[in-house]
Each structure stands twice: as C-alpha cells, then as structure tokens.
Amino acid sequence: MSADPRTLGWLNRALAHELSAVQQLLAQSVLARRWGDEALSKGLRHEATEELAHAELLMERLILMGVSPAAQPLSVARLGRNADELLLANRGLELEAIRIYKEALLHANRVRDTETASLMASILDEEKQHLVQLDAVIQGKSRSG
Ligand SMILES: [Fe+2]
Ligand SMILES: [Fe+2]
C-alpha cells in the first residue's frame, strides 16, 4: 500500500500529542512527588505509561507504512499549583486526544485505510475511557471537598 501523506500527517500529529502527554504527565508526577503526594505521583506516572503505549502503537503503524516517526513539535507541559489544577490540565489533554482521533478516524475511513482506521478507533475508545475515569476522580474530589 502506498502511504497517503495526509494519513501520515494524522499519525504524526497523534504521535506528537501522545509524546506531549507523556511529557506533561511525567513532569506532573515529578511535581506531585515533590509535594509529598506519592499516590498522585504514582497515578500520573501510570497514566504516562498508558499514553506511551499509544505512542508506540502509532510508531509501529508509521514504520509498517514505510516511514520514520516524525512527531513535532511537543507542547509545553501544563503544570499547576495543586492536584485540582493538574487534573484540569489533564482533562484538556484527553479532550484534545479525542478531537484528534475522531478526525484521524474520519480521514482513514475516507481513504479506506482499514488498518489505520481500526487503530484510530481503538485508541479513541481508550481516550474516551480516560476522560470518564478522570471525570470520576474530579467529581469524587469535589464531593469530598
Ligand atoms: Fe493517548
Ligand atoms: Fe489519554
């Protein structure tokens, strides 16, 4: 299959998003550890590994399509002054991921690239789950004050 340049563009855009997410979540994990909040730090680090796994899948797809991964630029990591601000910044990350994967999926379907489409659809599902989980944490925190 000859690689469609716009499909490659979406794969690299998604990859840049995932690597930016890893940067933000790991940086927040470091920050949370400095606050002495080990549970938050561990949770953020775990989320970073989930986004890293997405980056790996996108890289695999790019390599199978015969090109080197070329994600750029990375976004500046959004930090915060407390756990609530970190969670809010990460909610933005998940919303952005959902927007990217929805558009990437539409494009892959349009050009009838079923393998890329199924990858985009499966990562999209996981990003939607991330948002649901994050909202549950945010609501739980606001209930407990
Ligand atoms: Fe992701
Ligand atoms: Fe995510």
Image (spheres, rainbow, N blue to C red):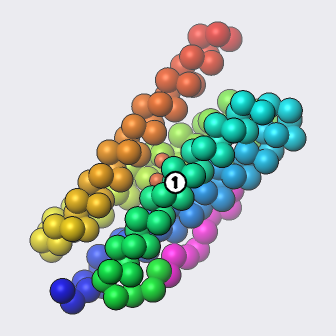
Left or right: residue 34 compared with residue 18: right
Residue 84: tell me if it is visible.
Answer: yes
Q: Is residue 107 visible?
A: no
Query: Going by the image, does 114 lie left or right of 73?
Result: left
- Residue ID at (53%, 45%): 92
Q: Looking at the picture, which amino acid does disc 1 mark?
A: Glu
Q: Residues within 10 Å of mark 1 (few under 14, many from 20)?
A: many
Decide if ligand 1 comes within 8 Å of the CB at mark 1: yes
State the extent of the magenta-drawn residues as a range.
70-77
Q: Secondary structure at mark 1?
A: helix
Find out whether residue 2 is within the magenta segment: no
From what the image shows, is residue 26 above or below residue 128? below
Residue 73 inside the magenta-drawn segment: yes
Q: Which residue is mark 1?
A: 51
Q: Quadrant of residue 141?
A: top right
Q: Quadrant of the N terminus?
A: bottom left
Going 73% across and 39% down the picture, which residue do you hit?
A: 41
Q: Main secondary structure of the magenta part?
A: loop
Quadrant of the drawing holding the C terminus: top right
Front residue of 26/91: it is 26
x and y percentages locating residue 25 in the rendered image? 65, 49
In percent of width and height, residue 35 lies at: 86, 35
**Residue that sits furthest to the top in the current view:** 144
Check the image and report above or below for 128 versus 53.
above
Q: Which quadrant of the structure image shows residue 90?
A: top right
Q: Position of residue 70 (x, y in %)?
A: 50, 81
Where does the image place residue 107, in percent across and percent down from the top left? 22, 67
Left or right: 40 as drawn, with respect to 95: right
